[in-house]
Image (cartoon, rainbow, N blue to C red):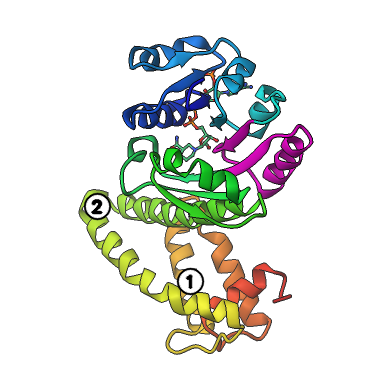
Amino acid sequence: MSDVAVLGLGAMGSALAGALLDGGHTVTVWNRTGHRAAALAERGAEVATTAAGALRAAPVAVVCLTDDAAVRETLVAVPGRTLVNLTNSTPEQDRGLADWAARRQMTYLAGGIMAVPSMIGTPAAFVFYSGDAGALQRHRALLERFGGVEYTGADPGRAAVHDLALLTAMYGMFGGFLHAAALISAEGIPVAGVEPLIRGWLTAMTGALPAMASAIDSGDHTATGSTVRMQALAYPNLLDAGRERGLDNGLVQPMGELLTRAVSSGHGDADLSVLATMLHGGRV
Ligand code: FVH
């Protein structure tokens, strides 16, 4: 028996298997197309020819495939095994797989990786987990090979909620940066020269997040400085500048619409955090 199986040897699965081998664990690997196992076999991994074989080869299997459909195509019932599914998923998909596993006497831990492959095994990486807390405890030493362990609760859907929330924030940042870069380059200014200023500004603006989070939790959106009205009046300049340069405003338009709607709903004097209530359809 190996200590652990890894199903899926794409960029991330290979990094996970590599970190386990680096940690001195015995590892059985499986990939749909076999050639991807070669490099890990040279490093000492056992190679299974079927997913079922890999699942039988270890008490715990780390699964890292493209998506939920690939996971569902791949998994077979092997009672007594623990599945740690690090495939990007929705909360509903993880809850469904946890049910699937429980009905087959298998244990399920959902995971959301907050790292790119090159970060795996470094202090910068961490993984959200949710589901069976006992399984997390039993396999913690293995899972710590990937990076920090952040347990988010017994509900198997919790890891995905956290993962998707952090990814959403990341894409908001990247979307803003890409539009800013388009605006700058449309003026013939090299983006690389302005990038440090953007980074500094974004870093400074993250200082607003703790107060915004408290406002969203408490429902008290009293503005201490910048009001929604002020921002709703300034925002169209940003959209006009894009339009006048022939840019696609698709990444920034929705925020402008939300600001306008907030003012017309009577939230002009509030803090920007009030937009969170608009996203809930005003129900919060
Ligand atoms: N790479 C990253 O930066 C991110 C970091 C955060 C977490 N994500 C998620 O991790 C999952 C895997 O991502 P990946 O980067 O390893 O993806 P690929 O390199 O494209 O490898 C995909 C593997 O999935 C296998 N696969 C696809 N479809 C099937 C299927 N129907 N049955 C069995 N296996 C399947 C594929 O096999 P093959 O094409 O080599 O035969 C690869 O092993 C993902 O959820 C990210 O969102 C990565």
Identify the residue at image location x=42%, y=62%: 241
Q: Is-magenta flag for residue 104?
A: yes
Mark 2, residue position: 189
In the displayed image of the protein, which residue is found farthest to the right?
103
**Residue 126 at x, y percent in the picture:** 42, 48
How many residues crowd mark 2 within 10 Å: few (<14), some (14–19), many (20+)?
few
Classify mark 2: helix, strand or loop.
loop
Whichever of callouts 1 and 2 sits on the residue coming sooner in the sequence is 2
Classify mark 1: helix, strand or loop.
helix
Nearer-the-camera pick, 157 or 41: 41
How many residues crowd mark 1 within 10 Å: few (<14), some (14–19), many (20+)?
some
Q: Is 187 placed above or below 76 here?
A: below
Q: Is 272 placed above or below 188 here?
A: below
Q: In the figure, is residue 264 to the left or right of 178?
A: right
What residue span does the magenta drawing correspond to? 81-110
Instruction: Specify the amino acid type for callout 2.
Output: Ile
Q: CA distance from mark 1 to mark 2?
A: 22 Å
Identify the residue at image location x=79%, y=36%: 103
Q: In the figure, is residue 164 to the left or right of 154?
A: left
Can residue 36 be seen?
no
Instruction: Give the number of marks.
Output: 2
Instruction: Specify the amino acid type for callout 1.
Output: Tyr
Q: In the figure, is residue 197 to the left or right of 3?
A: left
